Image: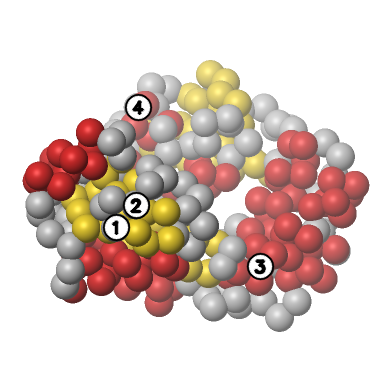
Amino acid sequence: MRLDGRPVALIGEGPAADAKRRLLERAGAIIVGEDAPGAALGVVANGDEAAVERLRARGMLLNVVDRPDLCDFTLPAIIDRDPVLIAIGTGGASAGLAAALRQRLESLLPAGLGRLATALFGGRDHLRARFPDIDMRRRAIGSLLAAGGPLDPLADHDDPAAVIAAAEAAPGRIERIEIASADPEALTLRAARLLGLADRLYIEGAIPDAILDRARADAQRMAGACPRIAGPGLTLHLIWTDI
């Protein structure tokens, strides 16, 4: 939700209210009191249920600190690599868990991630001209951003715009994966990564849905053995071994 320049009611004082104030102000919101007109959102940081009832009667959507049962929305832990924004929420189950995950992920994401996003935005016209077919363009971008690829998002890059300008179509390839367990947690890191990247799946045997759900929703799915030449992009030949 865009909050820039919009009023948000904040009820309460103290550390919890101060934390919500900082988060809202970072999003550009104008903090107002309970009686100010025009606010569609409110945050109740002091557990005042009477205030909750009054604001809800005015049609506001509310976040009530430490009361997920009273919340219409929650405020996630945020990782900011402008313009990349990563929000981690638990639906109010545990703000501490969301904060711990944010701290761990902060150490994994390079400071230049926002610069990469800006370069990709700036290179859109070039990529459209270079790869007019949308599937080919998606594969080229996927190849650039793949783990260990020229623009791996978890690595720093000196000149991502130059890499985008030199992008070439990803060559077609076929990978074979044997599936021996219905538990997706038993997938190797390589298998899980390939499932997330595949353009099409050839499914041989009764591969469980829990495994297939790890693949992209728009990946083509065919039953039976994989042909020797299966088209551009990444083709996976999944074989159920059940050993």
Q: Which of pointers 4 and 2 lies earlier in the amino acid sequence?
A: 2
Q: Position of residue 242 (x, y in %)?
A: 31, 31
Residue drawn at (71%, 52%), measured in percent from left and top? 141
Q: CA distance from mark 4 to mark 3?
A: 37 Å
Residue drawn at (40%, 73%), measured in percent from left and top? 106
Crowd around label 1: few <14 · some 14–19 · many ≥20 (10 Å): some
> As drawn, is 56 to the left or to the right of 177?
left
Q: In the picture shown, does residue 112 fall above or below 136?
A: below
Q: Amino acid at mark 3?
A: Leu
Q: In the picture shown, does residue 65 fall above or below 199?
A: below
Instruction: Check disc 4 and report the residue beneath it.
Output: 208
Q: Position of residue 3 (x, y in %)?
A: 47, 53
Q: CA distance from mark 3 to mark 2?
A: 41 Å
Q: CA distance from mark 2 to mark 1?
A: 6 Å
Instruction: Check disc 1 and report the residue beneath it.
Output: 33
Q: Is residue 106 visible?
A: yes
Task: Kindly report which numbered mark, 4 or 2, lies closer to the viewer in this rendering.
Answer: 2
